[in-house]
């Protein structure tokens, strides 16, 4: 899934970079009139714009899918859980007791001077 996402991102970047921008035609529209309409629709979409729309759709779907997959992980056991359930013997390690505070409850005697 990551591979599809990264490849789609690279394709989307390439398609956007090789397209001819609408701003480039605006200067020609005032002088010659051969650039089509200035503020209206520019007609049917060409191959590059349709390819960009498809790549953007695939990119958004893979983004949402990866987000869902990583926010809802599968209920698999970890390596430690598998080791515990396989009958491995756990050793109890004794924990040393912390020193008890004095009768007043202050630890002022423990502060170095």
Image (tube, rainbow, N blue to C red):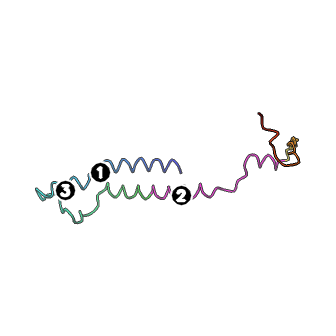
Above or below, 39 against 82 in this view is below
Q: Nearer the viewer, residue 45 or 79?
A: 79
In 3D space, how far apart are the residues under numbered discs 3 and 2 (Cα atoms)? 39 Å
**In the visual, does 70 lie left or right of 106?**
left
Q: Which mark is residue 77?
A: none
Q: Is residue 80 left or right of residue 14?
A: right
Q: Which mark's residue is nearer the viewer, 1 or 3?
A: 3
Between 77 and 26, the one nearer to me in the picture: 26
Residue under numbered circle 3: 26
Q: Earlier in the sequence, mark 2 or mark 1?
A: 1
| Magenta-colored span | 58-86
Residue position for label 2: 65
**Residue nearest the viewer, comparing 107 with 89:** 107
65 versus 82 height, above or below: below
Q: Separation of disc 1 and disc 3 at Cα?
A: 15 Å
Residue for badge 1: 19
Helix, strand or loop at label 3? It is helix
Q: Is residue 19 left or right of residue 27?
A: right
Q: Earlier in the sequence, mark 3 or mark 2?
A: 3
């Amino acid at each position: 899934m990551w591979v599809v996402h990264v490849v789609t991102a690279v394709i989307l970047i390439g398609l956007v970079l090789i397209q001819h921008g609408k701003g480039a035609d605006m200067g020609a529209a005032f002088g010659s009139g051969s650039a089509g309409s200035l503020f209206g629709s520019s007609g049917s979409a060409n191959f590059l714009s349709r390819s960009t729309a498809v790549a953007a759709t695939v990119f958004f779907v893979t983004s949402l899918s990866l987000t869902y997959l990583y926010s809802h992980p599968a209920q698999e056991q970890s390596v430690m859980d598998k080791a515990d359930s396989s009958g491995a013997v756990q050793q109890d390690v004794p924990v040393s007791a912390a020193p008890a505070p004095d009768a007043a409850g202050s630890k002022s005697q423990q502060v170095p001077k």
